[in-house]
Image (spheres, grey):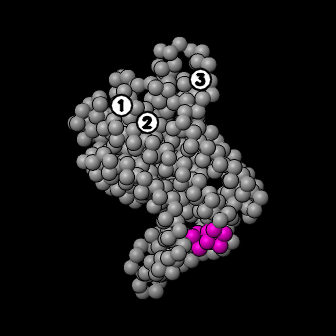
Amino acid sequence: MASSFPADFSSRAFEWSVVSVLAGCLVSAIVSPQFIAPLVMVFALAVAAAGFRAPNLPVAWSAPVIAAALLFLWAAASILWSIDPDLSIKRSFRLFLMIAMGAMVAVFLPRSALSARAGKIAALATLLALAVILGDTLAGSPMGRTLMDGGDPLDRAATVLVILVWPVGILTYRQFGLTGLAVLAAATALAIGLLNNKAAMLAAAFGCAAAAGAAVRPRFGTLLISGAVVLFTLLAPLSIGFFNSQIQQVVSDTGIDASIRHRVHIWSFSAEKALEKPLTGWGMGSSRAIPGGDEVRTFLRPDGQSDGEGESLPLHPHNGFLQVFLELGLVGAVLAAAVIFMILRKLALAAERSGLAAPVAGFALSAMIVGSISFGAWQGWWVSLQLFAGALLFILVRERAG
């Protein structure tokens, strides 16, 4: 069954939905990233409407979609042994929405190129958002403090920028050449630096290194992404648990910043608890209910004075891959790793053939770095942001390949 709309109408509608959602994500980076999740839901619905056809799952996407469905079923089953069944039900429903969005994009993403006008608007919108962020930060963040009600101004804007800069970089280069790309890169780097978001800074550094390697040898980008998925999703969470005593030495080292020690302590505690139920985990969304998670640890300075304190597990482990292992065990971790591996590898191979291996490698490494040190696995805005940026990259890669 073909789309009921004329092909040119569907193409234009889809194209402008991409531009609108991108602009909306940039506005959300300034106002509140929480708006990104509903925006990307609208994008997924637009994808399904523009590319609708009789159900015929492409072979290339059948495996990751099936793996994602199995991940959801396992998460739903974990309600039976969860220590917080009510929260598990809520988180399972959120996971279902995330997987449904991803499946719609994977199955129905149309072959639609972005016109020069749409690409120019997207690039200019990004530069405008960067100008607003830079201006507000240099002025002492009056707008940011107002929006955050006195909290940390524009706290997550840098994270949004470090993910979106890769597909927008392609559009900027295509419309404005090397000069435009240089302006975008410099403005993004300056914004991330001024916002002082350490996770975004680290992600940008690793992303740029990965992009440089893939630019020289495109095959390196594919291999790097494949290896990084295995490292971040499986090896790192297991290693934190197995080398827990050595990691605790980092927590006790008074020469390290207390905020870093607190984050490492959270990982250490989470991995230790994960190994208590290594196969099944504690149940979907149960991180905030883990026994002992509310215990407060004090971090000391060299002179023995307090250098801050923090809970062993506040809300979630601040490492999405470790959270999957903690809540869903090895079964869930393997299923999540399979989904991420198959999707990113497909994108990397397509980018390798189309000459866009560098931005895809940069995006993948940036996303995995941030996901492993900052946010929870089920935060809707964060997962949605990655889904949208990955879909936009796939559109550009497929367009370049013809």
Give neighbour class at mark 3: few <14, some 14-19, many 20+ (Cα, 10 Å). Answer: some
Label 1: state its secondary structure.
helix
Q: Is residue 252 magenta?
A: no
Q: Are marks 3 and 1 in contact (CB under 8 Å)?
A: no
- Residue 278 position, x and y percent, is 63, 68
Q: Amino acid at mark 3?
A: Arg
Label 2: state its secondary structure.
helix
Q: Residue furthest bottom?
A: 303
- In this picture, which residue range is highlighted in magenta? 270-278
Q: Nearer the viewer, residue 293 or 361?
A: 361
- Residue 92 position, x and y percent, is 69, 50
Identify the mark at residue 401; answer none if there is no mark: 1
Identify which residue is drawn at 54% across, 36% down: 59
Identify which residue is drawn at 32% across, 47% down: 219
Q: Marks 3 and 2, Cα distance to the nearest angstrom?
A: 20 Å
Horizontally, residue 12 falls left or right of residue 272, namely left
Q: Earlier in the sequence, mark 3 or mark 2?
A: 3
Identify the mark at residue 394; answer none if there is no mark: 2
Q: Is residue 61 above or below residue 74?
A: above
Can you identify the residue that label 3 sits on? 53
> In front: mark 3 or mark 2?
3
Number of marks in the image? 3
Quadrant position of the N terminus in the picture: top right
Q: Marks 1 and 2, Cα distance to the nearest angstrom?
A: 10 Å
Q: Amino acid at mark 1?
A: Ala
